[in-house]
Image (tube, helix red, strand yellow):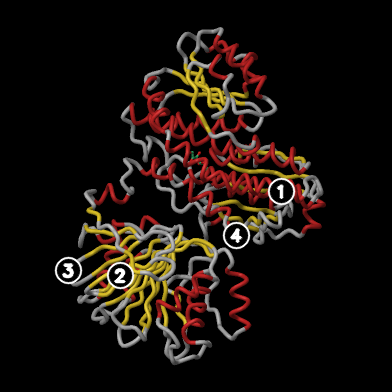
Amino acid sequence: MCGIVGYAGRNAAAPVLIESLKKLEYRGYDSAGITVLGSGIETYKAVGKIINLESEIPKKLGGTVGIGHTRWATHGRPNTENAHPHNSGVNPEKISIVHNGIIENYMALKERLIGEGYQFKSETDTEVIAHLLHKHIYGKPDGKEAQCELLVGLREALKEIEGSYALGIISADEQGKLLLARKDSPLVIGLGKGENFAASDVTAFLNHTRDVIFVDDFETAVLSPSGVEIFDREGNLKEKKIEKIEWDFEAAEKAGYEHFMLKEIHEQVTAIHDTLAGKVSELEGAIYLNELNLSEDEIRKLSRVQILACGTSWHAGLLGKYLFEQLAGIHCDIDICSEYRYRNPVMNEGTLAIAITQSGETADTLAAVREIMSYNCPTLAITNVVGSTITREANSVLYTRAGPEIGVAATKTFSTQITLIYLLAVKFALVRGKLSHDYVKSFITEIRKVPGEIQQILNQKEAIKECAENFAHAKSYFFLGRHLNYPIALEGALKLKEISYVHAEGFAAGELKHGPIALLDEGTPVVAIATRGQTYEKMLSNIKEVKARDAVVIAVADSKDTEIGKYADIVLRVPQSDELLAPLLSIVVLQLLSYYTALARNCSIDKPRNLAKSVTVE
Ligand code: F6R
């Protein structure tokens, strides 16, 4: 998740862009940059916070039109070359662009453009758009004469791009203009007097105007100091509604949600979509994990996977154990990192270590990884933070594309971690001949439906809220699950403990009768994850055991399950889905249940007591 900004007005653009970028810093903060249209394209970039960029910019920089970007790295490390804006054109540069989103076919486009003589300075997917656009306008890398208008060239270039984008574009040959384009990434225009603004979200320009136009998918726009024109996909001028923003800055930063956690729960729709982007092909039944430094032969020879993680990431890893063994037939062990180092682990030939850590900085995880690497074991890191310590130590890195997670309780980083684990397990199964291409095709069809299915759950969150409010003052909560739902039960309990301070325990449902059932008494809420699958009938038996002790059963069940209502007191529904993928849906219900419980108990949701977002001490 990055932030883009743009300005077309009569004042100096640079200070306005810097002010706007500071407001968007929460969207990404590993590097930043601006371009203003002075006598030509003038670009400044810096690694780190916006103040670093600010100190690079000359005090009296002219130019009243410009674009800016604050980056949360997805393709390429955080350094000045990879920072936006990205430019195209040779002596002088002609075009400058900023981008938020992911271009899925960038490798194919990049190879083609290199073949045509374009030279790339960065590792980003975005630079491809700059050169592609240049090619459509100037014909060749050193072309000097524009053969068409910027807007016409943009429309042609967009036809070749697959993926998501919010783009801000300026051209040395079209002074006084700022162009925008959008597909699947947020983009909003702010209307001022003699000046107009653009940004990924309204917080960027709320100090200047509250009159806005939201840009929709496939629209392009041209901003000048005196006006805004918006066009549809075919290039027809569109009438758009002007809306008034009533939020204060703090509410706007959270996109109108009361807490970052709730915003981040909602962002799972795009986060999972982005994590899948460019990694799956339904047509070919293929999964591309190009960042994995393991050949197919090495994947076939693996005898064991060792997962290392802490907390929520450990729950993602536990799901991984089930998947690697069940789908790919690879023996899989999982350890809590703080334990791993002190138990003198036995190392087998052919072990792949997978470290899961959203922050990439957890001290226990880093220590466990160093321990396992001392046995010359290849290591794969799954993390959300480009450039974090783990990415510099592991042999391969797969990134979740969840964007910055501000709420201390992990939500969207968990669901994107498990998205990557599904891809890894299915890929390994395919390479090892355990699954067919046809199966993989249908798996890809199903996993691509998940973001939409999560949206359906979010649309019905009132039912979950009501349930949370009814039990907000319970002394204890229990979470039960079997098979793939067992890690989800553990994660549901952890979420509730962390943010609402209610005592909660997660159990493998079959274990209940071996002890924990003694804790149940009248009215204890027991959340039973009972989506359809191989353990459904057994789960019903466990629900009956619980009911017999007068506890209250809150079942998480499929939308089409007509049986569950006979046994459970309350049923929270998820869309009917593939059994394998149901955990990605059930977890959203449990996150919302925790969130609304904490809200009803008036807890500090985004910053729970005693907890830190990244635990950098052992
Ligand atoms: C729970 C939570 C923690 C982390 C744990 C590991 O919501 O966020 O349990 O999962 O501290 O952190 P990472 O994934 O950064 O290694």
What separation in Å lies between label 1 and label 4 (alpha carbons)?
A: 16 Å
Dots 1, 2 in contact, CB < 8 A: no
Q: Mark 1 is on which residue type?
A: Val
Residue 382, given in percent of the width and then of the height, sits at 59, 51
Mark 4 Cα shell of 10 Å, populated few (<14), some (14-19), many (≥20)? some
Left or right position of 82 against 421: left
Instruction: Please indicate whether residue 295 sits to the left or right of residue 573 in the image.
Output: right
Give the CA distance from mark 1 to mark 2: 45 Å
Q: Is residue 595 above or below residue 546?
A: below
Amino acid type, residue under disc 2 in the picture:
Glu
* Residue assigned mark 1: 440
Foreground mark, 2 or 3, reads: 2
SS for callout 2: strand
Residue bearing the label numbered 2: 229
Counting residues from the N terminus, which is met first, the one under dot 1 or under dot 4?
4
Where 105 falls versus 504 (above or below)?
below
Eyeballing the image, is 540 above or below 373? above
User: Which label's residue is closer to the chain start, 4 or 2?
Assistant: 2
How far apart marks 2 and 3 lie (CA) works out to: 15 Å
Residue type (three-letter) at the residue carrying disc 4: Gly
Q: Which residue is mark 3?
A: 193
Mark 1 closeness class: few <14, some 14–19, many ≥20 residues within 10 Å: many
In this rendering, the label closer to the viewer, 4 or 2: 2
Inspect the image, locate mark 3, and give the three-letter code of the amino acid beneath it: Lys
Q: How far across and how far down the image is residue 208, in percent?
A: 20, 62
Q: Residue at x 68, y 57 (%)?
A: 283
Please tell me which of labels 2 and 3 falls first in the chain: 3
The image quarter in which residue 564 lies? top right
Residue nearer the viewer, 40 or 610:
40
Left or right of residue 212, residue 496 in this image: right
Question: Contact, CB < 8 Å: mark 2 with mark 3?
Answer: no
